[in-house]
C-alpha cells in the first residue's frame, strides 16, 4: 500500500477544521456528564465535532465502560480488561437525556467480548430506562456485532430502538487490517437480522471511513452491499489518525468528492446520507428522523406489549341501557 509521507505531517488540509468551544452550553453539557459520571464516545474516540455537538446540547453516550476488548487499528478507545457493568448506568443515562431536554439520543458501547451477551442486556435496560424517563424521544443505538449471537441481538431489538446503527467502517478487503476480530459479512448479516427481527419497523444505519486505502470501486461495492442488507441511512467521513500508533492516513478526501459520493449513495436508494470530511456516525444524528409509519408502528407495538393495544379513539361508544332511553323519551 503506497502512502504519501507528506500526509502524516502535523498540518492537515485546510478543509479539516475543528471548532473550539466558545458556547456556554458546551461547558454546561460537560458539567452534566461529569456530574452523572457518564462516558461519552465524543471524548473517548476524540471526535472532532464534540465542541459543536456539545454546544448544541447533544451527546452520544457510551455505556458498559470505556475499556474495549478489541483493538481496532483506527479507534482511540483504549483496549484493556473491562470493569464490571454499573447497574445504575441505564438510569443515569436516562436522567441525562431528561436534564438536557433531548429529543434524539444516541447510545453506543465498547465491544464487551468478556460478557456472554456482549452487553446486549445492558443496551436493552438503557433503552427502556430512557424511554420511560423521556417519552417521545427518538432512540438510536450504535452497537457492536455481539459475535453474531442472534439471541443477544434480539434483546436489543426487543427494546425497540428507532434507529439501529452498526458500522462496517471500511471496505471488505481492508476489514481484517482495520477492525479487530470483526468480519465484513458478519456485520452485514447483523444489520439485516436486526431489521428482520422487528419486521422492518426500524431505520437501519451504517458508516464508512474514507482515506484508509480503499478504491472507488470497493467503496461503491460496499454501498451496494449495505443496500442489499436493508440499510437505508449512511454516513461517510474522513479517517483521522488518533495517535502515531494507529493506522496511517493513506489519503485525504476532498469535500467535493464527499458531495459526489453523497449523490451516488442517494441514487443507490439510501434515504439519508451524511457525507463530509468531519462526518462521524452520530454527527447531526437528529437531522434524520425515521419515517412516521415506522415511528407509529414501534409505538403501537410497545403499547401492545404492555397490554394497551388500542388508543381512546379506537374504543367503541357506550351503548345506553333501555331504561335510560325510555327516561329520556
Image: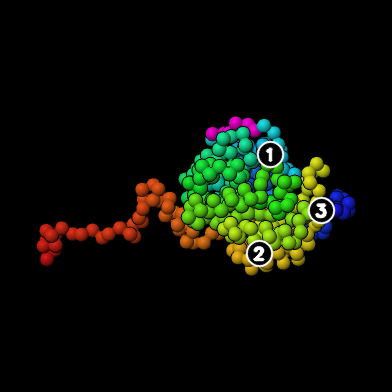
> Disc 3 or 1, which lies upstream in sequence?
1
Image spot of residue 238 (x, y percent): 74, 55
Residue 185 point in image, percent of width and height: 64, 50
Q: Main secondary structure of the magenta part?
A: loop
Say which residue appears at 71% left-offset and 54% top-offset.
Answer: 171
> What's the distance in space between the residues labelled 2 and 1, CA to CA?
30 Å
Residue carrying label 3: 250
Say few, some or many: other residues with alpha carbon within 10 Å of mark 3 (under 14 / 14 to 19 / 20 or more): some
Q: Residues within 10 Å of mark 1 (few under 14, many from 20)?
A: many
Q: Can you give x and y, in whole percent of width and height, for residue 311 in the image?
A: 36, 56
For marks 2 and 3, the one nearer the N-term is 3
Residue at the (63%, 40%) spot, across then down: 111
- Does residue 250 appear left or right of residue 116 in this picture? right
Residue 265: mark: 2
Indicate yes or no whether the magenta region holds residue 301.
no
Give yes or no for contact between labels 2 and 3 (Cβ–Cβ under 8 Å). Answer: no
Residue bearing the label numbered 1: 70
Mark 3–mark 1 distance (CA, rounded to whole Å): 23 Å
Measured Cα–Cα span from mark 2 to mark 3: 23 Å
Q: Quadrant of residue 67?
A: top right
Q: Is residue 83 visible?
A: yes
User: For the magenta stretch, what is the residue range?
Assistant: 82-87
Q: Please report the residue visible at 65 percent of the width from the left and 33 percent of the height from the top.
A: 82
Secondary element at image label 2: helix
Give the structural element (helix, strand or loop) at label 3. Answer: loop
Amino acid at each position: 500500500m503506497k502512502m504519501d509521507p507528506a500526509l502524516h505531517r502535523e498540518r492537515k488540509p485546510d478543509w479539516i477544521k475543528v471548532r473550539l468551544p466558545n458556547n456556554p452550553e458546551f461547558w454546561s453539557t460537560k458539567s452534566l456528564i461529569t456530574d452523572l459520571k457518564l462516558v461519552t464516545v465524543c471524548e473517548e474516540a476524540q471526535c472532532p465535532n464534540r465542541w459543536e455537538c456539545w454546544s448544541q446540547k447533544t451527546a452520544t453516550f457510551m455505556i458498559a465502560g470505556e475499556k474495549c476488548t478489541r483493538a481496532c487499528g483506527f479507534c482511540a478507545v483504549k483496549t484493556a480488561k473491562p470493569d464490571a457493568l454499573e447497574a445504575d448506568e441505564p438510569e443515569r443515562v436516562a436522567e441525562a437525556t431528561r436534564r438536557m431536554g433531548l429529543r434524539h439520543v444516541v447510545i453506543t458501547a465498547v465491544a464487551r467480548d468478556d460478557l456472554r451477551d456482549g452487553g446486549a442486556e445492558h443496551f436493552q435496560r438503557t433503552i427502556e430506562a430512557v424511554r420511560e424517563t423521556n417519552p417521545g424521544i427518538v432512540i438510536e443505538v450504535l452497537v457492536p456485532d455481539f459475535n453474531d449471537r442472534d439471541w443477544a441481538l434480539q434483546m436489543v431489538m426487543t427494546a425497540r430502538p428507532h434507529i439501529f446503527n452498526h458500522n462496517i467502517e471500511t471496505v471488505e478487503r481492508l476489514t481484517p487490517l482495520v477492525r479487530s476480530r470483526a468480519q465484513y459479512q458478519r456485520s452485514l448479516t447483523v444489520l439485516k437480522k436486526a431489521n428482520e427481527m422487528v419486521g422492518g419497523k426500524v431505520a437501519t444505519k451504517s458508516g464508512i471511513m474514507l482515506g484508509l486505502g480503499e478504491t472507488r470501486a470497493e467503496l461503491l461495492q460496499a454501498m451496494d452491499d449495505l443496500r442489499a442488507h436493508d440499510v437505508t441511512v449512511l454516513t461517510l467521513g474522513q479517517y483521522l489518525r488518533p495517535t502515531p500508533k494507529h493506522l496511517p492516513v493513506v489519503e485525504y478526501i476532498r469535500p467535493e468528492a464527499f458531495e459526489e459520493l453523497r449523490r451516488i449513495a442517494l441514487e443507490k436508494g439510501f434515504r439519508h446520507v451524511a457525507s463530509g470530511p468531519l462526518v462521524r456516525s452520530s454527527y447531526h444524528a437528529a437531522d434524520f428522523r425515521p419515517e412516521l409509519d415506522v415511528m407509529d408502528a414501534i409505538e403501537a407495538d410497545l403499547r401492545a406489549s404492555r397490554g394497551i393495544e388500542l388508543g381512546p379513539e379506537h374504543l367503541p361508544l357506550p351503548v345506553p341501557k333501555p331504561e335510560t332511553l325510555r327516561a329520556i323519551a
